[in-house]
Image (cartoon, rainbow, N blue to C red):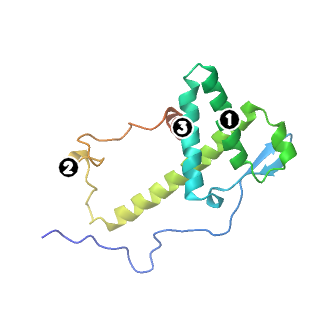
Amino acid sequence: MPEAIPSPGAGETVLALDTIITRPVIEVDGKRHEIVSLDELSIVELQRLTRWVDRIEALVKVDTEEAEDEFKQLIELASAMICAPMPKAVFAKLSGAHRWQVIEAFTVLLLRSKMSAAGAMQSAIAAMMPEGGAALGPADGMPLSPGSSAPSAGTGGSGFMKRLWFWLTAT
């Protein structure tokens, strides 16, 4: 019979949530302007934004007029969503390159949030493992990815996310 995995101790925090929204700030022409917080966006909006960024990355590799038009449209949509709290006149001054930088900065915030959540889950799992125990992995002959016979570390992800990961881990 398998051994039961112990649950976290009584009173142990397994997740910390904040309901007070603090918006990130960017500077435009020396003045501070708020952008949306990750916590303000719905799951659907975050997924849409992620799809747009992935599509933008794919369009960079295509050299057609149609791809360029779609690229510009997606940059406009994504940056407008992120910069919604910013005065319209300030947003209108931003060039395409500026808008792309806003998207990249927001994506870094999103990635940091996901890494923080993953770290919290890893800590919670580690706390539940028996002393001296380790999570299943390649050394145990178990795949790390469902449906895969090989470890998934270091594979997958879009080029943009790989560059972000490199940028975050290089600092």
Question: Can residue 31 be seen in this snapshot?
Answer: no
Residue 162 percent across, percent down from the top left: 49, 35
Q: CA distance from mark 3 to mark 1?
A: 14 Å
Q: CA distance from mark 1 to mark 2?
A: 48 Å
Q: Amino acid at mark 2?
A: Asp
Q: Which label is found at residue 91?
A: none
Q: Amino acid at mark 3?
A: Asp
Q: Give the residue drawn at x 74%, y 48%.
A: 83
Q: Nearer the viewer, mark 3 or mark 1?
A: 1
Q: Tell me whether circle 3 and circle 1 mark residues in contact (CB < 8 Å).
A: no
Residue 165 relative to residue 128: left or right? right
Q: Secondary structure at mark 1?
A: helix
Q: Which label is found at residue 140?
A: 2
Residue 29 percent across, percent down from the top left: 86, 39
Residue 164 percent across, percent down from the top left: 55, 38
Q: Nearer the viewer, residue 147 or 137?
A: 147
Q: Give the residue drawn at x 36%, y 66%.
A: 127
Determine whether 28 is above or below 38 in the image. above
Residue located farthest toward the bottom when viewing the structure as drawn: 10
**Which quadrant of the structure image shows residue 100?**
top right
| Sooner in the amino-acid sequence: mark 2 or mark 3 | 3
Determine whether 71 is above or below 138 in the image. above
Residue 6 relative to residue 32: left or right? left
Mark 3 surroundings within 10 Å by alpha-carbon count, few (fewer than 14), some (14 through 19), many (20 or more): some
Which image quarter is the N terminus in?
Answer: bottom left
Q: Which label is found at residue 73?
A: 1
Q: Identify the residue under disc 3.
A: 54
Q: How many marks?
A: 3
Residue located farthest toward the front when viewing the structure as drawn: 66
